[in-house]
Image (tube, helix red, strand yellow):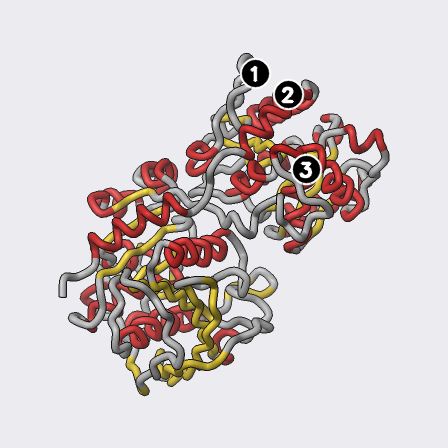
Amino acid sequence: MARALAASKAPSKAPKKAAGLRILMVASEAQPFSKTGGLADVATALAKALGRLGHDVTVMTPRYRAVAAGAIVGTVTIEVASHAFRADLHEVTLGPGARVLLVDCPELYDRRGIYNEDGKDYPDNAVRYAFLSAAAVNWASQQAKPFDVLHAHDWQSGLVPVYARSLTGKIPGTVFTIHNLAYQGLFSKAWVPRLGLRWQDFTIGGFEFYDQLSFLKAGLAFASAITTVSPTYAEEIQRPEYGHGLDGVVRARRDVLAGMLNGIDTDEWNPATDPLLPQPFDAAHLGRKAASKKALLEMFGLPADEHSLARPVIGMVSRMVDQKGLDLIAAVASVLPALGASFVIVGTGEPRYQGMWTRLSELHPDRISAFIGFDERRAHLVEGGADIFLMPSRFEPCGLNQMYSMRYGTVPVVRAVGGLVDTVRPYNPRNGQGTGLLFSEYRPDAMLDALGRALSAFGNKKLWTRLQKNGMRADFSWDRSAAEYVKMYKRVRRIK
């Protein structure tokens, strides 16, 4: 592994915990410190849920630019690519039994973006995330009380199971979670020796992928156990359609693969207590949701008169990329203003899709408004104030926004893939059962048909209210999934 030059110091304030597992997670994002997608939400929400179950959980994640930090509780120095990088470790408490260690290495992480700037990946991303993995393994090996399991998330921490092998007897078994198989951390094979990796592992059974080094494949090949974020996605990625060239690798390790459905942070995403909404509401006081709808329209510069408030609002909070179904929307963009609804959009992504929403907003300023960027208040207002949430994904490992939406009485319209089909129950207009509208075929007309069914249901207030409440009463907390992770951790930890 990358060579450690100085041992890290143990934390000054060890968490007081009852008997339970000691778990070290490694993730490139963690709320509220950094976020580009659902990984950040999962890393901290799962850690907090495990802490509530009586376990001792530490999340190691980079300290990016402008991220506030806690007290320094240790340091680590690792040589990567012939350069010694030093990082201070800042501790921040998440809740009972859970904390974050922010890896503060300005040379690597103090930048305008997280992974890229102006659409271009940082050329040293291999170094940045090899260092994160190596620092986590080295720090864990120095602790007086050993960890029971290392849990690495996505390609950015895919080298954790590889580096952990060099410390046999000090480091426990490893779990690797795939949040999105499409993002694989591919780099030139020239990085192999520079990152302290072995050429004998640069094979089809190791981390070689079409003559490149794949961080994600390293995690798949060397982890003790593999999880992904929904049962359906665990099945899908074993097929060429969704395997992104790695379906064979996943099939080869299916005996240690499990689909663990993500939960949501029900403290942060709770309409009854959400400070970012103008008025709290719940299933018993659904009429109060109207205040959020009015605030949403006003924030996005759309008419908020009585007539406009009676019209359904369709919301999206999404990366503007093909994976999220933006090509379907682009194919019917000219039809959207005629649907009899307003559209509010929050997100960033490919310039062509950002431009599409900007042009639609300019052409139809009374019906469509897009915010290019990410803003937490806008995201919460979309969930709280919209009537319908559109999520027409080409593929979706789990998805969180559909669960946020249902909790806020905003009915999801989604494609029946991955975690979307695992969480959204089809609406049945005959008996009022179900929590959302689904479509199967990845076609623009199929998406429009599902939207049409949603708009038709919106016109029947009694059925619509029942559909909203069905979703609001569903349980998407982390408690059940966290308990499943504990079972897996106990299977993979090494017997001392």
Q: Residue furthest right?
A: 305
Q: CA distance from mark 3 to mark 1?
A: 21 Å
Mark drawn on residue 386: 3
State the residue at coordinates (47%, 68%): 93
Q: Residues within 10 Å of mark 3 (few under 14, many from 20)?
A: many
Q: Which mark is residue 151?
A: none
Residue 61: x %, y % from top left: 44, 68
Q: Is residue 234 visible?
A: yes
Sequence-wise, the earlier of marks 3 and 1 is 3
Instruction: Name the side, left or right, on which 336 lies relative to 389.
Output: right
C-alpha distance separating marks 3 and 2 = 15 Å
Task: Indicate the secondary structure of the residue bearing disc 1.
Answer: loop
Instruction: Please tell me in which quadrant of the rendered image residue 48 appears.
Output: bottom left
Of mark 2 and mark 1, the one earlier in the sequence is 1
Is 15 left, or right, of 351 in this rendering?
left
Where's residue 101, x and y in %? 43, 71
Pointer 1 residue: 429
Q: Which mark, by number, is residue 457?
A: 2
Quarter of the image with the N terminus in it = bottom left
Q: Is residue 380 placed above or below 92 in the rendered structure?
A: above
Q: Are marks 2 and 1 in contact (CB under 8 Å)?
A: yes
Q: Amino acid at mark 2?
A: Ala
Expressed as whole percent of the image width and height from the top left, the position of residue 329 reads 62, 35
Q: Amino acid at mark 1?
A: Pro
Residue extending farthest to the bottom is 6
- Specify which label sits upstream in the sequence, 3 or 2: 3
| The C terminus, quarter of image | bottom left
**Mark 2 residue element:** helix
